[in-house]
Image (cartoon, rainbow, N blue to C red):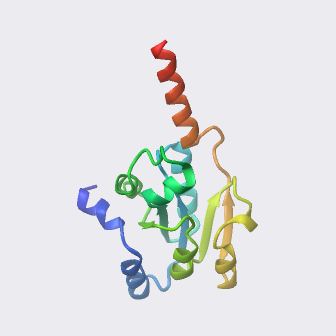
Amino acid sequence: MTKNKLKAKLIDLKDFLKLKKEKFQTKTIVFTNGCFDILHRGHVEYLARAKSLGDILVVGINSDSSVKRLKGEKRPINNEIDRAIVLSSLACVDFVIIFEEDTPYNLIKQIRPNILVKGGDWKKDQIVGADLVTKNGGQVFSLPYLKNYSTSKIIEEILRKHTKNQI
């Protein structure tokens, strides 16, 4: 996949809404979101499952400033453009939209996806935007996730190994 094709998947909300109106009116749009700071197997399997629920998978990713507010000053490890490009390289991901807020509520409100998906650590009634999606006749899913796969665990393991090697 060329750099231009990867960047074509990174889209702003205004351009996505125009595309939706022109080309995706009969398509089932699936939306999910997250920081996706260090992409790992758990993310990849989760995103593939999310895509299998519809025609178009839109992934909202937290901006760098949003990740800092949510995860602390040492995060993100990778900047928002790098995270978006890595996500864009996955065949199952159709579009990536970066959002500045701490939650994707306003993004979900405007996109109006048919299906909203989060990982299994989220209960359906805690998923941000679930009220909007169900009100519009859509579905909300909490998909199972692979245990022992998380960005935080990867960072902890790197730090543990680094510290061990310095002694």
The count of marks equals 0
Q: Position of residue 162 (x, y in %)?
A: 47, 23
Kindly indicate the quadrant of the structure image that contains residue 131: bottom right
Q: Residue at x 67, y 70 (%)?
A: 140
Q: Residue at x 24, y 62 (%)?
A: 4
Residue nearer the viewer, 161 or 52 = 161
Question: Can see residue 35?
Answer: no
Q: Position of residue 86 (x, y in %)?
A: 38, 52
In the displayed structure image, the side of residue 127 where residue 166 appears, left or right: left
Quadrant housing the N terminus: bottom left
- Residue found at the very far top of the displayed protein: 167
Q: Residue at x 54, y 62 (%)?
A: 33
Q: In the picture shown, does residue 140 fall above or below 135? A: above
Kindly indicate the quadrant of the structure image that contains residue 70: bottom right
Q: Position of residue 16 (x, y in %)?
A: 40, 78
- Residue found at the very far front of the displayed protein: 73
Residue nearer the viewer, 166 or 89 = 166
Question: Can see residue 148?
Answer: yes
In the displayed structure image, the side of residue 120 where residue 96 appears, left or right: left
Q: In the picture shown, does residue 32 fall above or below 18? A: above
Residue nearer the viewer, 105 or 16 = 105
Q: Position of residue 159 (x, y in %)?
A: 51, 28
Q: In the picture shown, does residue 157 fall above or below 167? A: below
